Amino acid sequence: MKYLEEFSDPALAGKLLDQIHATATRPWAMMEVCGGQTHSIIRHGIDQLLPDGIEMIHGPGCPVCVTPLEIIDRALAIAARPGVVFCSFGDMLRVPGSSQDLFSVKSAGGDVRVVYSPLDALNLARENPDREVVFFGIGFETTAPANAMTVYQAKRLGVRNFSLLISHVLVPPAIAAIMESPTCRVQAFLAAGHVCSVMGTSEYPPLAEKYRVPVVVTGFEPLDILEGIRRTVLQLEQGRHELENAYPRAVRDEGNLPAMEMLRDVFEVTDRTWRGIGMIPRSGWRLSEAYADFDAERRFEVTGIRTAESSLCRSGEVLQGLIKPHECAAFGKECTPRSPLGATMVSSEGACAAYHAYRRLELVDAK
């Protein structure tokens, strides 16, 4: 606890804020990529303590939020089938599909279970050889190694009644897509430290150079974020566009080499659709051909499902950083954590959930 408290020290936070105020001479707009960073920024009021004109744009870095609707509907279809045990982390159970969520399937008799690791789902498959056990594998590069290892173990152990429904997405292609959007206002990025702890930092210098934007890798505690903002503002003011690692206690430039080797073995890069954003080329992973037998989409033949997004929900614009959550007319009215229209109101990393939880309900509160 003491270690964590050191990164929330008010006196040190004040000194970093003083340096940011002293450095900034003009407006700047930067995007924190990760939804965990968004929650920390809103929870601690960091965006409201920054100089006037320094805007934090909330990015698409919530894996639950960007899981496309068709994948959610495929999950619902698989989970409702007799003889299936559908396993997921808890934050996916209330994500709305076209007409229901996984809790609804569970209440109607589907065997939907919350697990704490994909290995828990593999153990269920070994204990229930007469049932098909499916794990809902979503996330950025952070959660992918555990899912890859689980499939690797399933193949090694010969567990044939286990499969993965996968929707893994990659951060660097999303940054490129944001920068190439005609509506882009982003001038710099705070990169997600946990992603870089797996993949390293080598993918970011080319992005910084190509789009002429600073990229600063940072963590999730208040001092981590403030130090990331300080470095970013300094680069912007000096006209630099470089990668900086402001999270060296967790991130090495080379990344986690054994995890990356496992990912290369089990997955291959593919185009992915992001909810609210659309298709981004080569922005995701799927199982490689050597592990294709463990692909739940192939096993259950659920690729032809038709989807329908809510006409009231503007979560796609939130995910692209085009609007803040409370600029959506449905926010806090038709859309609440109890009756969400989109995943951004449900997920523990969703921007809409952060604004609702920490009472950012009025437009006048925006910086």
Image: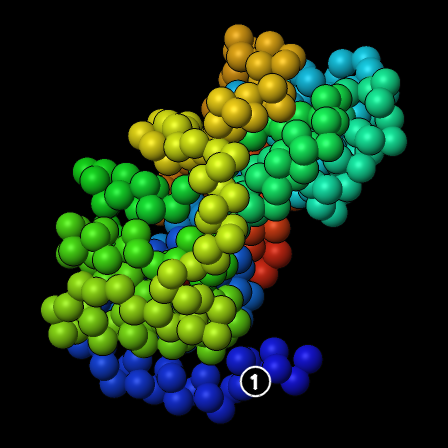
Residue 259: x percent and y percent? 52, 51
Relative vertical location of residue 97 with respect to residue 190 in this rendering, above or below: above
Give the residue pinned by disc 1: 6
- Locate the C terminus and report the quarter of the image it occupies: bottom left
Observer able to see residue 334: no
- Locate the N terminus and report the quarter of the image it occupies: bottom right
Amino acid type at circle 1 is: Glu
Identify the coloring: rainbow
Q: Residue at x 26, y 43 (%)?
A: 176
Q: Residue at x 30, y 80 (%)?
A: 20
Residue 314: x percent and y percent? 44, 35
Which corner quadrant of the image does residue 192 belong to? bottom left
Q: Which of 327 and 276 is in front in this view?
A: 276
Q: Nearer the viewer, residue 179 or 57?
A: 179
Observer able to see residue 303: yes
Residue ranking furthest to the left? 239
Residue 14: x percent and y percent? 43, 87
Q: Which residue is drawn at 41% across and 42% down?
A: 170
Residue 60 vs residue 333: left or right? left
Residue 277: x percent and y percent? 38, 33
Question: In this figure, what is the number of numbered marks?
Answer: 1
Q: Nearer the viewer, residue 158 or 297?
A: 158
Mark 1: few, some, or many residues within 10 Å (few <14, many ≥20)?
A: few
Residue 58 vs residue 113: left or right? left
Which corner quadrant of the image does residue 163 belong to? top right
Q: Which residue is drawn at 74% across and 47% down?
A: 116
